[in-house]
Amino acid sequence: MSNPFLQLKKQFMKAAHLTQRKRDQSSQRVFFVNCGLVLTLAVVSIGYLVTINTLATKGYAIKFLQSQIAVEKKQNQELLLQGIEARSLSNVSERIAALNLVRSDRIDYFGRTSVASAK
């Protein structure tokens, strides 16, 4: 027969080994969960930084484009004024005088039913 203390010791060692094994598995799970959390935090942080950087860059681009729009509007107003000035009656009269054109007293227009306009 075997010694009862020896059997008890074997059972105790077996239980201690199983408990240690469960602790090891549990600590491995905790380690992997912690690694997963750290990795997730790193990915979210990098995504946040990229998003903030992109938004800041777009903000500067919008400001630049708004300033260009203001410049273009000013140039458009200047061109409109130049066009109005070029079409003004006094300016046209001055050009006619400068080109020595002759004023016509009789102007004939073709009607809608004339032969020349029908062809």
Image (cartoon, helix red, strand yellow):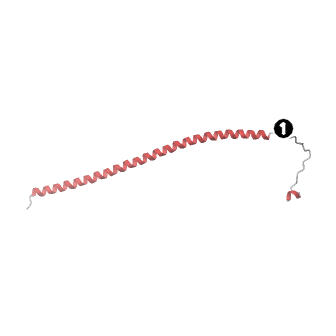
Farthest bottom residue?
Answer: 1
Q: How many marks?
A: 1
Farthest front residue?
Answer: 99
Residue 113, visible in the rendered structure: no
Q: Residue at x 62, y 40 (%)?
A: 68
Q: Residue at x 56, y 42 (%)?
A: 61
Q: Where's the C terminus, which quadrant?
A: bottom right
Q: Viewed as shown, does residue 86 lie left or right of 76?
A: right
Q: Viewed as shown, does residue 55 lie left or right of 68?
A: left
Q: Where's the N terminus, which quadrant?
A: bottom left
Which quadrant of the view contains residue 77? top right
Q: Nearer the viewer, residue 103 or 28?
A: 103
Which quadrant of the view contains residue 88? top right
Q: Nearer the viewer, residue 83 or 96?
A: 96
What secondary structure is marked by label 1? helix
Q: Nearer the viewer, residue 102 or 53?
A: 102
Q: Residue at x 73, y 40 (%)?
A: 80
Q: Residue at x 90, y 48 (%)?
A: 107
Residue 98, given in percent of the width and then of the height, sits at 85, 38
Vertically, is 45 above or below 25?
above
Residue 67, given in percent of the width and then of the height, sits at 61, 39
Amino acid type, callout 1: Glu
On the image, numbered disc 1 is attached to which residue? 94
